[in-house]
């Protein structure tokens, strides 16, 4: 019960890494708001874990504001925020990515961190502390070709994590990031362009441990970084990548 009594928001909590984090947090005693653009997926995970489901578009301020109100109405406070929601563009030359796809990637992966901070950081300041976790990517450390603007959005998230950590530390708010390698999530096919044995083999060849990451892998790291065990840890971007970034 390492999060006993804590109240958390997990964006993109209806599937993939987010669902893994929700399950782990709930199993460790946290009350979790499962926020997702797919309301049905959020409701399913919330029902499974005894949490609260809310529809959110993390790229829209009004939607993020509504999510925050829902958490405060349900829990009365927010101890943990996990910015997990993310999208990518399909693999293609950087000069062929459409402006709409570029705008969507930056809005969901980068602007969302700003929007949630605007809503939730003041509440954490008033409460005297909190933990924010940004789910970035190894793409922000060791970029893959043909995913340039996705890579850039995750690099932005890593820098934002460090900047937030320095500024918010005096208020007792810790900010960290996780850099997962590609995992068995709904985004995997988008990263690869097509899900074939050949493409999987190419991706796996870049991961020394020889497998994709799982929601459980990311959830275990998230649990540590958001727990009191990590009370001296802020501003880190930890690779959970099977050695890819070595």
Image (cartoon, grey):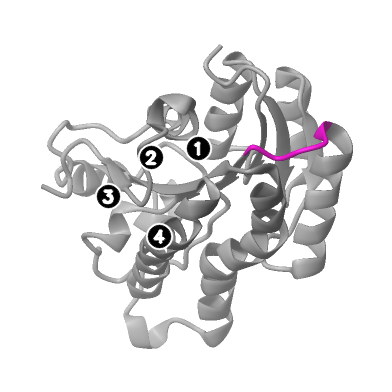
Residue shown at 32%/79% (left/top)?
93
Instruction: Provide the secondary structure element on which disc 1 rests.
Output: helix
The Cα–Cα distance between marks 4 and 3, rounded to whole angstroms, is: 40 Å
Q: Which residue is under mark 1? A: 17
Numbered disc in front, either 4 or 1 = 4
Q: Residue at x 43, y 65 (%)?
A: 160
On the image, numbered disc 3 is attached to which residue?
199
Label 3 close to label 1 by CB (< 8 Å): no
Magenta-span inclusion, residue 76: yes
Q: Which mark is residue 158?
A: none
Density class for disc 1 (Cα within 10 Å; few <14, some 14-19, many ≥20) is: many
Residue 233: x percent and y percent? 35, 40
Which residue matches tag 4? 166
Q: Residue at x 71, y 37 (%)?
A: 34
Q: Are marks 4 and 3 in contact (CB under 8 Å)?
A: no
Of badges 4 and 2, the one in the foreground is: 4
Which residue position holds label 2?
Answer: 183
């Amino acid at each position: 019960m390492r999060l006993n009594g804590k109240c958390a928001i997990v964006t993109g909590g209806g599937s993939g890494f987010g669902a893994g984090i929700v399950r782990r947090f709930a199993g460790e005693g946290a009350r979790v708001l499962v926020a997702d653009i797919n309301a049905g997926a959020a409701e399913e995970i919330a029902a499974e874990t005894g949490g609260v489901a809310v529809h959110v578009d993390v790229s829209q301020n009004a939607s993020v504001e509504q999510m925050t109100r829902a958490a405060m109405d349900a829990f009365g406070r927010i101890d943990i925020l996990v910015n997990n929601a993310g999208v990518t563009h399909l693999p293609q030359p950087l000069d062929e990515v459409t402006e709409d796809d570029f705008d969507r990637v930056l809005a969901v992966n980068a602007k969302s961190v700003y929007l949630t901070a605007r809503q939730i950081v003041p509440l954490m300041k008033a409460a005297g502390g909190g933990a924010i976790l940004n789910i970035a990517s190894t793409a922000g450390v060791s970029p893959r070709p043909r995913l340039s603007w996705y890579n850039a959005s995750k690099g932005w998230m890593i820098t934002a994590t460090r900047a937030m950590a320095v500024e918010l530390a005096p208020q007792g708010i810790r900010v960290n990031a996780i850099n997962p390698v590609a995992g068995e999530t709904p985004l995997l096919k988008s990263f690869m362009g097509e899900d074939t044995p050949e493409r999987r083999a190419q991706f796996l060849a870049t991961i020394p441990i020889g497998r994709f990451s799982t929601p459980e892998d990311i959830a275990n790291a998230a649990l540590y970084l958001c727990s009191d065990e990590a009370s001296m840890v802020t501003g880190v971007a930890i690779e959970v990548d099977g050695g890819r970034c070595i």
